[in-house]
Amino acid sequence: MGYPGAGDRAEGPADLTTAERAWGERAAELVLVVRAVLATQLRLGVRDPALDDLTQEVVRRALDGQQRARPGAPLRPWVLGIARHVAADEGRRRARLASLDEAGPARAKLEGFPDPGADPEELAGRAEGLERLRTSLAQLPESWRRALLLFHIEDLSYQEIARQLRVPLGTVATWIARGRAQLVALVRKDG
Amino acid sequence: MTVIQAGALWRDDGHLTLDAVTAAADGQLGDGEAQVHLHGCDHCLRAVGEAALLTSDVADMLASLRQEETLRALGAPATRRRLSPVAAIAMSTAMAVLAFVTGRLSVSGGDDGPQGSGSNDLGLMVSSATHLQLRAPELAAPAWPSLSRDCLNLELPQ
C-alpha cells in the first residue's frame, strides 16, 4: 500500500546540496525512532509495508520542511513531531476508510484519534500546569532529576552525563528512564 | 558507539531491557545486535516508540518551563505578554504617535526638514514599534538562565 505523496520527490541524491546531505544524514539516524513511533501509534508490525511507506513520508516531509526549521533547534523533537502528525493523518485516513464499511463505530474512532502534540503543550502552557511540573520535578530523586535535566536542558549525551555524574552508562539510562516515567506520572496524578 | 553494557541490554525472555529501550529512543544505543533486533521485533520496536513519545512529552514540558523561567527572570509576566498582543501593539502605536506629535511640536516654527517627512517618520515609527513588539518574545528568548541552576535551585556538577 502506498502512502499518498510518498515518493513524489523527483530529485535524486545528486541534486542535494552539501548542507542538505548533511542534514539528511542526521535525519537518517532518526529513522529507527520514527519507525518505532509510527508502529506504536498505528499498531503496525515491523514487516508491514505501510511502515516503510509512512517512514519515507516522514523523511520526505522533514526534508521538504528543513528550511522552516529554526536554525540550531534540535532535530529530534521536530522530526518526531512530524512522525506524530503523519501517524495522526494516517489514523484519520484509516478511520475514514473504515467508516465507509461500518458507518457508526468508525466515526467515534475518527473523532477519538488523538491530536499529536496537543496534550503536553496544553498541559505545560498553562501556569498551573507549569507549577505542577515544577513541583513534580522537585519530588524526583535528585540523581534522576539531574540526569533528566542534563539530557533535556543541557543537551548532553548519556556518555557526557555519565562522565559528569561519575556513574556507569547503564545507570544514566536507568535514571533517565525512571525519571521520565515518574515525572509524567506525577504531573498527570496531580492534574 | 555502544553505550549500554551488553549485560544490561537483554532480558531473560530475549527482549531488550527498559534501559536499552530508553537509550534507543534517545538515540544513544549505538550500532550492534540490539539495533538489529529492533528491526525485527514488534514488541521492542513499539516499546521504543512508547519511550520516544514519552521523551517527546517530557522535552515539550521542560521546554515550556524553560521558556516561562526565562521570561520570568527577565521580569516579564510571560503569560500576560502572550495573551495580549493586540493591546501591546495598540500601546506601542499610541506611544509612536505621541512621540511623533511631541516631535512635531518641538520643531514647529524652527528649521523644518523636507516637506512630508513627518508622515514618513510616523509610518516608520509605527511600523518599527509594531515590528519590535511582534519580535519581542524571540528577541528575549535566547538568553535564558540555566533552568537547572538558577530557576530550580539545583546545583549541577561542573
Image: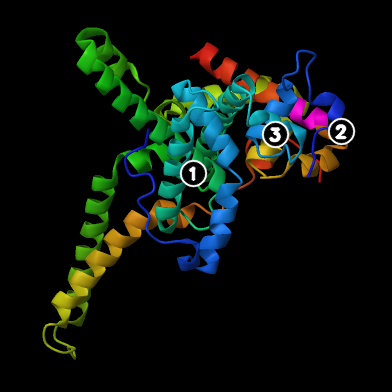
Q: Earlier in the sequence, mark 1 or mark 2?
A: 1
> Which residue appears at 40% of the width and 47% of the height?
A61
Q: Mark 3 points at which residue?
A: B36
Q: Could you tell me which chain the residue with mark 3 belongs to?
A: B
Residue behind mark 1: A78
Callout 2: helix, strand or loop?
loop
State which quadrant residue A107 falls in: top left
| Dots 3, 2 in contact, CB < 8 A | no
The crowding category of the residue bearing disc 3, from other C-alpha atoms within 10 Å (few below 14, some 14 to 19, many at least 20), is few
Same-chain check, marks 3 and 1: no
Whether residue B74 is in magenta: the answer is no
User: To which chain does the residue with label 1 belong?
Assistant: A
Residue B30, x across and y down, in percent: 74, 41
- Extent of the magenta region: A170-175
The amino acid on which the numbered mark 3 sits, given as a three-letter code, is Val
Asked whether residue A65 appears in the rendered view, the answer is no
Give the tally of numbered discs: 3
The kind of secondary structure element at disc 3 is: helix
Above or below, A82 against A121 in this view is below
Prevailing SS of the magenta stretch: helix
Residue A79 vertical placement versus A35 (above, below) = below
- Residues at marks 3 and 2, CA–CA distance in whole angstroms: 24 Å
Taking the spot 53% from the left edge, 51% from the top edge, the residue there is A73
- Residue A108: mark in rendering: none
What amino acid is labelled 2 in the image? Pro
